[in-house]
Image (cartoon, helix red, strand yellow):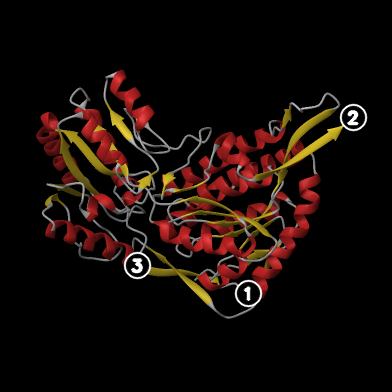
Amino acid sequence: MPTFRNFIGGSFQEPGTNETIEVRNPATGQVFAAVPAATEAEVIAAVRHAAEAQKSWGRLPAIERGNTLRRLADIIETNAGRIGEALAKESGKSLADATGEAIYGVELMRYHAEWARRIEGEVIESDTPDETLMLKRAPIGVVACLIPFNFPIYTLVRKIAPALIAGNAVVVRPSNNTPTSAFIFAECVAEAGLPAGLVNIMTMTHDVAEVMCKRHEVGMITLTGSVTAGQVVLDYCKANIAKPSLELGGKTPVIVEPDADLDVVTRSVLAAKTAHCGQVCTSVERLYVHASVHGDLLERLKTAFAARRFGDRSAHPDHMGPLANAAARLRVHHMVERAQAEGAIVETGGYLPDGDGYFYPPTLLSGCHQSMEIVQEEVFGPVLAVIPYTEFDEALAMASDHQFGLASVVFSESYRKVMKAANEIEAGELYVNRFPADPYQGYHAGWKRSGLGGDDGKHGMLEFTQTRLVILKH
């Protein structure tokens, strides 16, 4: 069984305790690795190393920081196969998808390296002629990065690349479900020769993560996770008034108008709902279908969902993979059972499969209505609730009448209806005639309980800065 070491202060450290965290392959349920559980002393040391490294890193010209990111990106690209192998085993993804995630992370890091010459301040008009106001952008200091299990390498890059280009240092906690790929990533950091302590990557228990996040040196905590996790992080932030950046739950609504191409909708919905077994923050979870095409689309989806195979993607790369763990599978199944009790009809799926691994079949539910738990709460699994409507305004109101507001989708050829949705939908993103893919030059930010702050693009990079106003008398 492979063992790993926490990456602290620029090197892999011998563990300070015998406590380890088991890592299971979700396709088999078998333990395949053990990672060290960092001690309080180790995370305190890591934060201190980060704070020290940040002082000189933040003073470097941004173009030098950009060159360092490019060098790291090149090394990650060279090791994408190794990262992909680890990621595939810990996540249940196919090797191709896992390696592709590493490559996408490389592209994202190179994108953020290009911000080196584009970090901008402002010159603001003063009230007096002999004075100039300058608003400068400065790094925050040490950023604690809390990484989810579903896209552990891409999200790691999504957080550390803008943090580093802006002049910060980072302490990273990978998900305990998917940590092994992060340690391969740490090997790339070591090879790239980044300043010792600038990037620290450690696995730990929740209690130790709290110690790390509440250190006075930590000026920002960035999380991708559940609403519950976000609420915990906000409590952490209160200790030192650290800045939060939170991408939390999603419940993507899809509105399908009568003029939509139902073949395209069917293919798109199936792909979006079954990608990574539905464990995607922007995965379609609510399907609002105009009554005139509801029956037709439901039959198409039923056929498509029933035909979608699932299983171990190391043997069958084209199959849908597993959920993250046994608890996640049981949670999804119980939600389906409660939906049935509320009157939903299981068109296909909705059962616990026999055999090893944490698999769950693509599940299609009809007879749903807005007040059901299955419509109101995030499933984070391959389950789709279908709801008919008669007027576009009705669908738009139901899509927005929700606690979450991350992504949304409209299938329509009417520019008037599309623009109405663009102006009124209560979500941070609207995709028209396609499904979410988070373009990294955009801005991925949720409304309501879907989060605070955001990722990607100029605005995502600026999340990792703070301002200094200079009032210059002359």
Q: Which quadrant would residue 390 be assigned to in this image?
A: top left
Tell me where residue 247 appears, x and y as whole percent: 47, 49
Q: CA distance from mark 1 to mark 2?
A: 51 Å
Q: Residues within 10 Å of mark 1 (few under 14, many from 20)?
A: some
Q: Which quadrant of the figure contains the C terminus?
A: top right
Relative side of 148 to 379, left or right: right
Residue beneath label 2, please?
A: 474
Disc 1 target residue:
40
Residue 178 visible in image? yes
Query: Between disc 3 and disc 1, whose residue precedes?
Result: 3
| SS class, disc 1 | helix
Q: Which mark is residue 245?
A: none
The image shows a total of numbered marks equal to: 3
Tell me: residue 441, above or below residue 106: above
Quadrant in which residue 219 is drawn? bottom right
Tell me the amino acid under the disc marked 2.
Answer: His
Image side of residue 10 versus residue 302, left or right: right
Q: Which residue lies under the disc numbered 3?
A: 29
